[in-house]
Amino acid sequence: MNLQNLRPAKGAVHKEKRLGRGEASGKGGTATKGNKGAQSNTGYSSKRGHEGGQMPIQRRLPKRGFIPISRTEYKVFNVGQLDQIIEKYGLQEFSLENLYMNGLISKTDKVKLLGQGEVKGKVTLKVNAISEKAKQAIEAAGGSVELV
């Protein structure tokens, strides 16, 4: 095999369709775009979700549910997870900065601690919100809670 013998595999290269190049080509006149109408003209683009005059799906389906604007979304952790997280990542305290640095939350997330499970060691917490049960469990284990 030499450089002058190299060529693409058989069937890999296709001939370009020459549209609108006379009636003899079989694709002359309208260049396979049909007769008249917006789609046959240059610069045509349909709006997103347009279904050709049919009622679009977002209007056919009923609206469901309600999400209040003032709702605060929290990233939730349970008391039972604290020991595992602190041990796995070697944290001195359970704070937003430490959680962000270890990839457990994003920069803008708010953290809430819930009371499911048991905490074994003494833990220092800095979170946005905490349930009453979780607060009692932390303080009973000798830890401290600070709301940010």
Image (cartoon, helix red, strand yellow):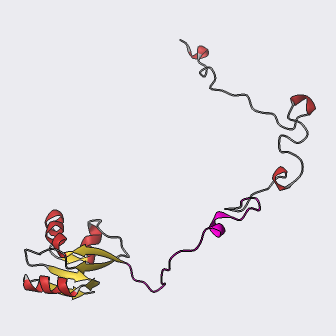
Q: Residue at 89%, 51% (x, y): give it.
A: 36
User: Does the stretch in magenta take in 58?
Assistant: yes
How would you classify the magenta stretch by its main secondary structure?
loop
The C terminus lies in which quarter of the figure? Answer: bottom left
The percent coordinates of residue 136 (x first, y second) are 14, 86
Q: Quadrant of residue 44?
A: bottom right
The percent coordinates of residue 18 (x first, y second) are 81, 34
User: Does the stretch in magenta take in 111?
Assistant: no
Q: Residue at 8%, 78% (x, y): give it.
A: 122
Vertical position of residue 147 compared to residue 90: above or below: below
Left or right of residue 13: residue 46 = right
Q: Quadrant of residue 97?
A: bottom left
Left or right of residue 101: residue 119 = left
Q: Quadrant of residue 59?
A: bottom right
Left or right of residue 22: residue 128 = left
Q: Nearer the viewer, residue 43 or 112?
A: 112
Number of labels in the image equals 0
Q: Residue at 72%, 59% (x, y): give it.
A: 51
Q: Nearer the viewer, residue 11 or 98?
A: 11
| Boundaries of the magenta span | 51-73
